[in-house]
Image (cartoon, grey):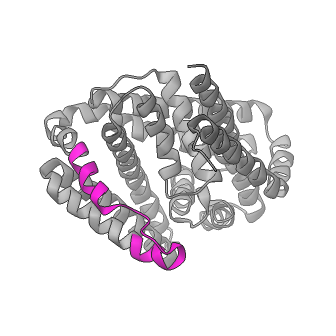
Amino acid sequence: MFVYNPPTMRKFILILILFLGAAFVFLSFGELESILKTLQHGNLWFILLALLIQFAWFLVTGLTYQSLYHLLGMQDGLRKLSLMSVAANFVNVVAPSAGMGGMAVFISNAARHRQSVGKVTIVSMLYLFLDYVAFLFVLTLGLIVLFRRNDLDPTEIAASAIIFAIAIALGFLLYLGSRSAEALGNALAWMARFMNRVAKPFIHRNYLNEARAYEFAHEMASDLKSLPEKRHSLIVPFVYAFANKALLMLILLTTFMAFQVPFSAGTIIGGFAISYLFLIVSPTPAGIGIVEGVMPLALSSLRVPWSEAVIITLAYRGLTFWVPLGMGAIAFRMLNREKKNG
């Protein structure tokens, strides 16, 4: 008879995720080969500068989480939080689960160090909300650029509307929790019922526990209620969220310079806004296969020659998708080794 063994289960999950990562790389080998060949033709110093900026992005992501941890009265080191954020990104890509797989990295760490799971969930929600708000600011500028150049089409408007709707829904949930645990519990229970109706024809059972939704809401509510009193403390995470997007745009700018492709501020803002927009709304993890098709179209509509737009896209995705994915695999393995040794 099978007996549940937590260490055995953790080892199995670790092996499964690393296997999925290896399979993902194998299936995308053709794209990786194209990216490596493309990068070889760029200016080495600008590519190294872009890599340095990407590592700064890792650091800023960790600083964002650290500032949100402090906001809710928790402590964790910058190195640890940076590793967890990169590992969470890796898990979300190789084992897509609407962000829940990545969140599990933080929740597992919280449980191991006897931190509140509710607080860690709030941190994850706040991080996502701030990330959307910062991007919506950039997206608005990008849409203005496209509108002024008569290149704004219905697809981009529809995708932008989805992002606005997600940000509003997330903000509304945070607001509900800050006002009433019961209201948040009702909202989470409704979401659980909806998910159960969708999943039941396939798995023939309830996927989510509605009663647990109310318990979870009460666990989160006390911390959410204190947020309005800490409005000024949200300034630092907001600044980091905007710095996060600024660094990604700086990588795109550096990529243009590496291949000596002329650009303007509007080209950088518009190109980044559209590529990141479809990265978020894409049905594939991290926009794989979608962004590679949309970004050259966006850049060419911004007067970048098609052949150069393809080169920029391959190089940029190599730096901002494949480098973090590889670092995420390393971070995930490091965290599991530390867990085992701890």
99 relative to 108, above or below = below
- Image side of residue 135 versus residue 310, left or right: left
Q: Nearer the viewer, residue 298 or 286?
A: 286
- In the rendered image, residue 207 lying in the magenta stretch gets the answer yes
Q: Can residue 299 be seen in this view?
A: yes
Q: Which residue is drawn at 55% across and 63% down?
A: 278
- Image side of residue 242 versus residue 57, left or right: left
Dominant SS type (magenta): helix
Q: Where is residue 161 in the image (x, y as percent from the top left)?
A: 39, 70
- Image side of residue 209 versus residue 182, left or right: right
- Image side of residue 85 versus residue 18, left or right: left
Q: Which of 261 and 57 is in front in this view?
A: 57
187 relative to 317, above or below = below
Q: Which residue is drawn at 44% across and 73% down?
A: 157
Q: In which quarter of the image is the C terminus?
A: top right
- In the rendered image, residue 27 lying in the magenta stretch gets the answer no
Q: Nearer the viewer, residue 2 or 262?
A: 2
Give residue 329's quadrant in the image.
Answer: top right
Q: What stretch is highlighted in magenta?
A: 196-219
Q: Position of residue 317 (x, y in %)?
A: 68, 50
Q: Which residue is drawn at 73% across and 40% down?
A: 258
